[in-house]
Amino acid sequence: MTYQHILSELKDQVLYVTINREQKLNALNKETLAELADVIAFAAVNDEVRGILLTGAGEKAFVAGADIAEFADYNGQQGEELARKGQESVFNAIANCPKPVVAAINGFALGGGLELAMACHIRVASDHARLGLPETSLGLIPGYGGTQRLTQLVGKGRALEMICTADMITAAQAESIGLVNAVVPQGELMAKAESLLAKITLRAPLAIAAAIKAVNAAAGSDENGFEKEIEEFGKCFNTLDFKEGTLAFLEKRKPVFTAK
Ligand code: COA
């Protein structure tokens, strides 16, 4: 698939994905969502990709939301389809991706933009970033998982405050409530995300994938997270990476993991 609205580049086992609609503050229109779905599906199965760094073009916005112009005349059924399709193909696909996805929030992360960042496994933000779920000011609620993921990350009280006031918060406030993992000056944002991914890509890839599954199960109402952990823990013992990791430790050398 040729991409019109995103840039993607593989470097040092990390797939850099940049949403590239700077004139529209990287708002998520249908094509951009389709391209994101495609690139995440590719990254999930490509052995050369060990991690994904997701960011927005320019210094003003990570993503300023779903493209409001596209759904302005939707009815209820079209709205439901929009949310369902987006959640399945992009937002849940990112959250369930076996490769770690780090969001580098380089500016506004609003509505679908914050939901996109929250679907990622780790978030780092530049100090000028502003985050919020302003949908209630449009007569909507978040539809790409925002009511669920924000509540999981910051708790019910703060989630309802952010959603019902539609207020934006600063990067520093976001860090203080656990919505982002770290805040750095804009010039250091990519380096911060890269250093996290550089560490993660040294670890055993199948163990990382198992960790993502087990941690995700903590939020799922349809599965027992402790059971999932036991199951994933057991599966790790069947991997060559487990043999290599333990052998390397005993031989006092660095492991060479092969994702097998
Ligand atoms: N959907 C569609 N277009 C958007 C957009 C969105 N979510 N967010 C920004 N844009 C477009 C603007 O329409 C404008 O396009 P134009 O130049 O063709 O008129 C361009 O991006 C620049 O945005 P603008 O509003 O002029 O920038 P600003 O600096 O004055 O304000 C924001 C920045 C982020 C505060 C403002 O763009 C905004 O509130 N965006 C919508 C946020 C939102 O409600 N998101 C949730 C959607 S569900």
Image (spheres, helix red, strand yellow):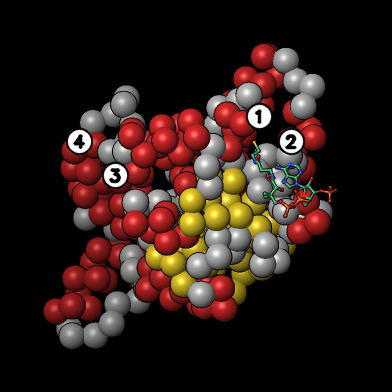
Residue that appears at 55% across and 60% down: 129
Q: Earlier in the sequence, mark 1 or mark 3?
A: 1
Give whichever of discs 2 and 1 has the lower sequence position: 2
Identify the residue position indicated by label 3 in the image: 214
Q: Residue at x 58, y 37 (%)?
A: 134
Left or right: 236 as drawn, with respect to 150: left
Q: Amino acid at mark 2?
A: Ile
> What's the distance in space between the residues labelled 3 and 4, CA to CA?
9 Å
- What residue is shown at x 34% (from left), y 57% (from top)? 176
Q: From what the image shows, is residue 127 above or below residue 3? A: below
Q: Which mark is residue 227?
A: 4
Q: Amino acid at mark 3?
A: Ala
**Res 138 label:** 1
Does the beta carbon at disc 4 come under 8 Å from ligand 1? no
Q: Secondary structure at mark 4?
A: helix
Mark 2 touches mark 1? (CB < 8 Å): yes
At x 19% / y 71%, what residue is drawn?
246
What kind of element bears circle 2? Answer: helix
Q: CA distance from mark 2 to mark 1?
A: 9 Å
